[in-house]
Amino acid sequence: SDISNKIAAGEVVERPFNVVKELLENSIDAGADKIEIEINDGGLSLIKVSDNGRGILPNDLPNTIERYATSKIKRFEDIYSINSYGFRGEALAAISSVSDFKIHSKRDGYDGFVLIKNFGENFVIKPSPIPNGTIVEVANLFQKIPVRKKFLKNSNSEYREILKFIKCFSSINFNVTLKLIKDGEVVLDLLKDNSMIDRVKKIFNESSLFELKNTYGSLSIEGVLSTPNNQKFRKDYLIISVNKRIVKDFGIMQSIINAYHRLMPENRYPFAFINLNITGDDLDVNVHPTKMAVKFFNSNDIFSFVYDSIKAELNSLTL
Ligand code: ADP
Ligand code: MG
């Protein structure tokens, strides 16, 4: 029901940046390699994401805002896998219940349609002549819900959080063409890159970086890290993704820091972007609705793998 969607909305989306994360992950799930993001007033008045992904069949459009209506779980076991970013079908149900929401979509060979759901109203569907792909517009997020609205920060701080997320997301998804428009001005305009290090160098003004790649059984790691002379005062740039989904994992963060032990003072940290590919059996992402947290079944193996991979690379650097 709409009420349970609104309750869930508080868990799935807390701030505009969570909306941006869900929409961008949906675009990647849809196979998009070109994404445009528009943010007005820190996402408080508008968040718009356009992609060139496979689009949605006209008959499936209403399902996108039904709770638990995900097109991504084929088998029950898939609940335990984040090979596909989204899997619970909660995000759009939640977002569309707390905003003025539109989703336009066109699948190749079909006509394009838009589903419009203004806050508190039933949805309507109309024709929409767009190119193949999907456009999601989230306007006035939480603006008509006083209890939620009061937790929002001002548009500048909401924007800073969104920008930081987009920079990290686009570093991990380096092979996607991505444009960010803030209040009508182009802020990021990135063509596909061939490697994570190329993208990271474009986005962050960092030198003294090296690439990391390693595989062990069903685990693989790829990343961009700073050499020991490039030290940070804060842990802000320890960015971890699992199967290309950005997560918060203090165990992996600590494994990265430990690998630099003796190469950096206690109160300094490396700059690191790490993507771990882990197959479904080894992880459980059903920990928190925002999916920022993951639980590993074999966390110690994963921590050792991260530590050993970085340590070996650091050793070879200093040889
Ligand atoms: P989930 O991603 O967990 O399946 P969401 O609520 O994020 O749930 O999305 C619901 C459904 O809407 C998806 O399963 C997908 O079928 C469809 N969808 C959402 N965004 C897009 C998009 N950008 N391109 C194609 N399909 C989309
Ligand atoms: Mg999703």
Image (tube, rainbow, N blue to C red):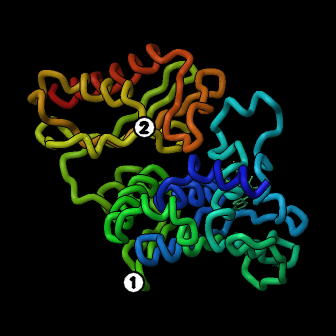
Residue in front for this viewpoint, 147 or 194: 147
Q: Distance from label 2 to label 1 (Cα)?
A: 30 Å
Q: Is residue 132 left or right of residue 313?
A: right
Q: Is residue 206 left or right of residue 262?
A: right
Name the residue located 31 percent from the left edge and 40 percent from the top edge: 238
Name the residue located 29 percent from the left edge and 57 percent from the top edge: 201
Q: Amino acid at mark 2?
A: Lys
The answer to whether residue 71 is seen in the rendering is no
Residue where numbered disc 1 is placed: 185
In this figure, what is the number of numbered marks? 2
Looking at the picture, how far across and down is residue 36, in whole percent? 54, 72
Q: Is residue 27 left or right of residue 36?
A: right
The answer to whether residue 149 is seen in the rendering is yes
Looking at the picture, how far across and down is residue 160, in whole percent? 33, 63
Q: Can you say whether 40 is above or below 315 in the image?
A: below
Task: Say whether marks 2 and 1 touch (CB < 8 Å).
Answer: no
Q: Amino acid at mark 1?
A: Glu
Q: Which mark is residue 248?
A: 2
Residue in front for this viewpoint, 33 or 92: 92
Helix, strand or loop at mark 2: loop
Q: Quadrant of ligand 1?
A: bottom right
Of the image marks 2 and 1, the number of the one nearer the N terminus: 1
